[in-house]
């Protein structure tokens, strides 16, 4: 395609002759470069347009105009001028590379890769073309292809720090965590002040369960950038994972200091205070987490658990209901609601919640057990036996389930079955065992089972 059919020479009568002289000299290119490098894109654009009035076949001027338009975020317009530059100079790999970068900026990654390949046809070892191909593959989530590109880059230039950084990201995404760590370390050898690399390395170490090493990486990131809120937050998570809740709270507080709208930091501080049994402080922080993010069911659940442990069952129930409105498929909330209803003496209602728990999580043996106990309280022992059998099927060594079955059998005059269940429970929990003669001590046995 010929992009220059309609070009006409139109001298601007208001155009200063001194500026014309300047633009026809080497100083014009210097001026454009200085303005471009200084981020003064609008001024650079004016100089280029004036220059093009007198040199309409300058490939370099069209190329510079494309770069300036990219700098202004006008990528679609920039593409037109890259094409004009290519039409005048089809063997300049740099123009193809930057057109590819412009296409990548608009989300047209496959087309961008085509232009990087064209650049590589001209200069097969051009690391910029290979690296940017890798970035486009990465954005397409074609991580194997991206890794091939970045590995090729460091093979050609072992000091290409950004390629190691991107390798770290790609390997992390593919769950090749050791390779990810190795890549970030190579990057950091070349660029030790990249706080994002320290942070990402910490994320990967955390995924490996290496929490203390993760803390070291987060703290290196924070040594470079002390207001790095995400690093404070994740450092808090790592400290929490190793049980250092005081340090975790300190980190979360710093996260909030630099990002006061982070509801998750407030939520995690609340959890830490809950674990420290400081329920008042936990509720205070859950309140703030909910104020900032009323859609987080976990914050309602956490605050409800605080109320439950304080014996404030009505408020606990209200919070569990709020959480369930946001996530009706969270079995743990149904379980807590059931226990709360039992604490309020509302056993019939509790049954519906226990039923939801076992429907959502058929492997929760404790839920089957508590469900069965609620049925016993409501004088429905036969239904309870079925649930206890299911509990034992899941957890065969649960002594309490056998004790509960023994109680049901004794109360229903099935002495033989009751004694059998009792002896199994004693085998599972030998410290409970006591000598008895059933004929003489049956009342003692019943009292033991009821009070247990």
Image: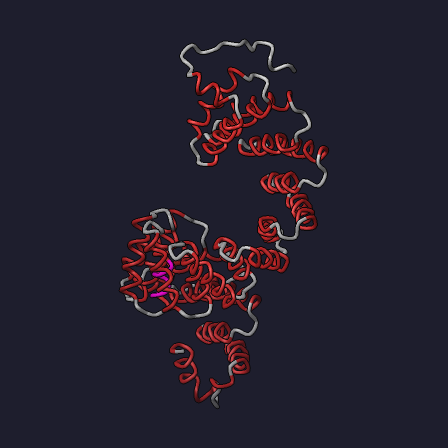
**Residue 132 to residue 406: above or below:** above
Residue pictured at 46% horizontal, 69% vertical: 242
| Depth order, front residue of 172/42 | 42
Q: Is residue 201 visible?
A: yes
Q: Magenta stretch: dominant SS?
A: helix
Q: Is residue 385 visible?
A: no
Q: Quadrant of the C terminus?
A: bottom left
Figure label count: 0
Residue 154 picture location, percent across and down: 66, 50
Q: Is residue 45 left or right of residue 253?
A: right
Residue 224 picture location, percent across and down: 44, 57
Q: Quadrant of the N terminus?
A: top right
What are the residue bounds of the magenta stretch?
A: 268-273
| Depth order, front residue of 112/96 | 96
**Residue 366 to residue 119: above or below:** below
Q: Is residue 25 left or right of residue 254?
A: right
Residue pictured at 61% horizontal, 54% vertical: 175
Q: Quadrant of residue 271?
A: bottom left
Residue 86 highlighted magenta (yes or no): no
Residue 312 picture location, percent across and down: 27, 63
Residue pictured at 50% horizontal, 32% vertical: 33
**Residue 345 to residue 79: above or below:** below
Residue 319 picture location, percent across and down: 32, 54
**Residue 257 to residue 366: above or below:** above
Residue 269 highlighted magenta (yes or no): yes
The figure's colour scheme reads secondary structure
């Amino acid at each position: 395609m010929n992009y220059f059919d309609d070009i006409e020479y139109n001298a601007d009568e208001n155009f200063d002759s001194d500026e014309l002289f300047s633009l026809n000299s080497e100083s014009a290119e210097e001026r454009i470069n200085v303005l471009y490098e200084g981020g003064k894109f609008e001024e650079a654009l004016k100089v280029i347009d004036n220059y093009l009035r007198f040199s309409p076949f300058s490939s370099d001027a069209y190329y510079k105009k494309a770069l300036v338009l990219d700098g202004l975020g006008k990528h679609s317009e920039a593409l037109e001028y890259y094409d004009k530059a290519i039409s005048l100079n089809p063997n300049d790999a740099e123009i193809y590379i930057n057109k590819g970068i412009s296409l990548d900026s608009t989300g047209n990654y496959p087309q961008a890769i085509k232009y990087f390949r064209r650049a590589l046809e001209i200069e097969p070892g051009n690391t910029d073309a290979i690296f940017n191909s890798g970035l486009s593959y990465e954005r397409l989530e074609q991580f194997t292809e991206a890794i091939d590109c970045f590995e090729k880059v460091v093979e050609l230039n072992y000091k290409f720090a950004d390629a190691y950084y991107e390798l770290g990201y790609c390997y992390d995404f593919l769950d090749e965590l050791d390779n990810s760590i190795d890549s970030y370390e190579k990057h950091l050898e070349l660029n030790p002040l990249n706080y994002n690399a320290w942070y990402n390395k910490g994320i990967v170490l955390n995924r490996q369960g290496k929490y203390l090493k993760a803390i070291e990486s987060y703290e290196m990131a924070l040594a470079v950038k002390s207001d790095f809120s995400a690093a404070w937050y994740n450092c808090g998570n790592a400290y929490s994972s190793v049980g250092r809740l005081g340090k975790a709270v300190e980190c979360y507080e710093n996260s909030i200091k630099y990002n006061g709208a982070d509801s998750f930091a407030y939520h995690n501080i609340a959890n830490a205070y809950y674990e420290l049994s400081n329920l008042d402080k936990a509720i205070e922080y859950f309140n703030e987490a909910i104020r900032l993010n009323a859609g987080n069911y976990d914050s309602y659940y956490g605050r409800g658990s605080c109320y439950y442990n304080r014996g404030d069952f009505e408020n606990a129930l209200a919070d569990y209901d709020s959480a369930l409105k946001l996530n009706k498929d969270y079995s743990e909330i149904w379980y807590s609601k059931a226990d709360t209803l039992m604490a309020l003496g509302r056993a019939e209602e509790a049954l519906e919640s226990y039923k939801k728990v076992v429907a959502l999580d058929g492997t929760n043996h404790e839920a089957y057990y508590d469900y069965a106990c609620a049925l016993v309280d409501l004088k429905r022992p036969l239904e309870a036996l079925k649930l206890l059998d299911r509990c034992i099927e899941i957890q065969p060594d649960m002594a309490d389930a056998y004790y509960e079955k023994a109680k049901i059998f004794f109360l229903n005059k099935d002495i033989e079955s009751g004694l059998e269940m009792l002896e199994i429970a004693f085998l599972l929990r030998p410290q409970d065992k006591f000598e008895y003669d059933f004929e003489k001590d049956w009342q003692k046995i019943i009292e033991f089972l009821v009070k247990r």
